[in-house]
Every structure is written in C-alpha cells, then in structure tokens.
Image (tube, rainbow, N blue to C red):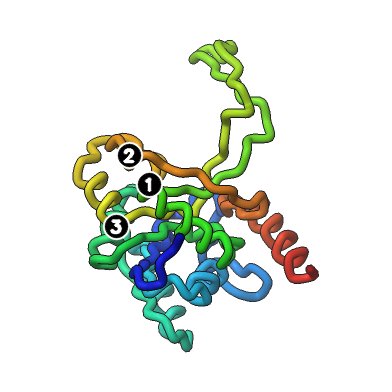
Amino acid sequence: MYNSDQEVGAIIVAAGHSQRMGNVDKIFAPLAGEAVVLRVLMPFLECKAIDRVVVLLNGKNYDEGTELFGAQNWDKEVVAHLGGRRRQDSVLAGLKQLGDCDFVVIHDGARPLVTVDLIERGIEAAQETGAAAAAIPATDTVKVADLDMYVRETLPRENLWQIQTPQVFSYDVLTKAYSKVTKDVTDDAQIVELNGGKVKLYQGTYDNIKITTPADLAIAEIFWKRRKRK
C-alpha cells in the first residue's frame, strides 16, 4: 500500500526528435486545443502522490518548452532539463536533476492519455518489488522470424504483454540498476531486469497510446473526445 509520507518524483521523457511526424514536434502538437506535453503533465500535477516533475527536452525544443512551461500557473514544481542522445541518457539526466526521493515515476512525453488512476496504481504496484510497469495483454499473434522472413516460432499469446508507461521504481533500485547498465535498452524496466530485479506488471489501458505518427495523433484526439463524453 502506498505510504503518503513517501516522496515521489516524476520524469517525463520528451527529448525525442519526432522523425516520423514530418516537420512537427509531437510534444507541441495540439491535442484538443492544448499541446501534447501539457496534456501529459496535467495528471501528474493533479496526482497528490507526485511531489515534483522533471521534463526532459532536446536541444531543439528546449527553449520552446521552457517558454511554454513558464507561461503556466502551476502549484507544483516542474523543471525542464536537457535530455541525452538515447532515452536512457535522458532518464539518467532526469534522475540527477530530480534528486533523492523514495519512488520515481517515468512516463513518455508522447503518451497524453495517462490518468491519475494509472499513475497511482503504478506507485502502489511498485511497493511490492521496487519496480512496476503498465502493460496490456497482447491482442495480436506474435511470430519470431529469421533474417529471411521465415517464421521460426509462434509465441503463446497468453504470456505476452505490451509494455507502456508509466513505469514506477524505487529510487534506490533504479539508480543502482543505472549504475551498472552497459548496453542499449528499450525501456527502464529492462534496465532493472538486466540488474536481476523483478518488475511487476499492472493493467494499463488500451487508449494510453504513444504518439509516433500523425495518424496516432488523430486517434488520440478521438480517444480524448470519447473520454470527455463519459
């Protein structure tokens, strides 16, 4: 069970280069009248468990991001910081900027349909092993192929999960894992796995999509409007 005395920081990773969005930086793309990154931030600002937030930006969008954040009237501390070349470099920079705390919530800056409930359930799930990741059951059949595109194996779908963010970690577990990582990874949970840690999966949501292409942005708009009608 989450202890309200625990200090929880959040890291929003928004330092990518939006290569598949054409000339548009996806974190500033409008979603229902607000920039995607602001839609991402709002649940973290509303979540009572979150004490402070660090947003990782790249060299090209840093000035625009800091100007956008500076124009907001937020009660909670939000700090913009430069990310690194790889995602893991950005998160490491965010950890250093965030400083010591009990738990860290890491979220993609291109997943604007995150909710307070999703954040809070992640924090609760992480109490068990010090690491938790939102995930949804795979709905498609997944096959392993060789380099010539011949199927080698069909994986049992009941054991497959599509990983999302938020991902939540004990600060000590994550910083220790980062101190030992030597290879490129696809997410922060993998860093903990490589260090021998256990990651608890908890139920994500199918509308918690990551915006990568203009089509994703259009789908996110539909999900957003549907959510607001409920």
Kind of residue sitting beneath label 1: Thr
How many tags in the picture? 3
Tell me which residue sits at (59%, 48%) in the image: 203
Q: Residue furthest right?
A: 229
| Occupied quadrant, residue 101 | bottom left
Residue nearest the observer in this picture, 33 or 138: 138
Indicate which disc, 2 or 1, sits on the residue closer to the N terminus: 1
Indicate which disc, 3 or 1, sits on the residue closer to the N terminus: 1
Q: Residue furthest left?
A: 179
Residue 173 location in percent, x, y?
A: 28, 49
Which mark lies nearer to you, 3 or 1? 1
Q: Residues within 10 Å of mark 1 (few under 14, many from 20)?
A: some
User: Alpha carbon of mark 2 to alpha carbon of mark 3: how far?
Assistant: 13 Å
Residue 229 location in percent, x, y?
A: 79, 70
- Label 1's element? helix
Kind of residue sitting beneath label 2: Gly
Q: Are marks 3 and 1 in contact (CB under 8 Å)?
A: no
Kind of residue sitting beneath label 3: Tyr
Tell me which residue sits at (46%, 79%) in the image: 68
Q: Is residue 12 visible?
A: yes
Q: Is residue 63 visible?
A: no
Which mark lies nearer to you, 2 or 1? 1
Q: Are marks 2 and 1 in contact (CB under 8 Å)?
A: yes
Q: Is residue 184 above or below residue 61?
A: above
Residue labelled with disc 2: 197
Say the numbered circle drawn on residue 129. 1
Q: Residues within 10 Å of mark 3 (few under 14, many from 20)?
A: many
- Label 2's element? loop
Q: Residue furthest bottom?
A: 73
Residue labelled with disc 3: 171
Tell me which residue sits at (37%, 53%) in the image: 169
Residue 147 location in percent, x, y?
A: 49, 15
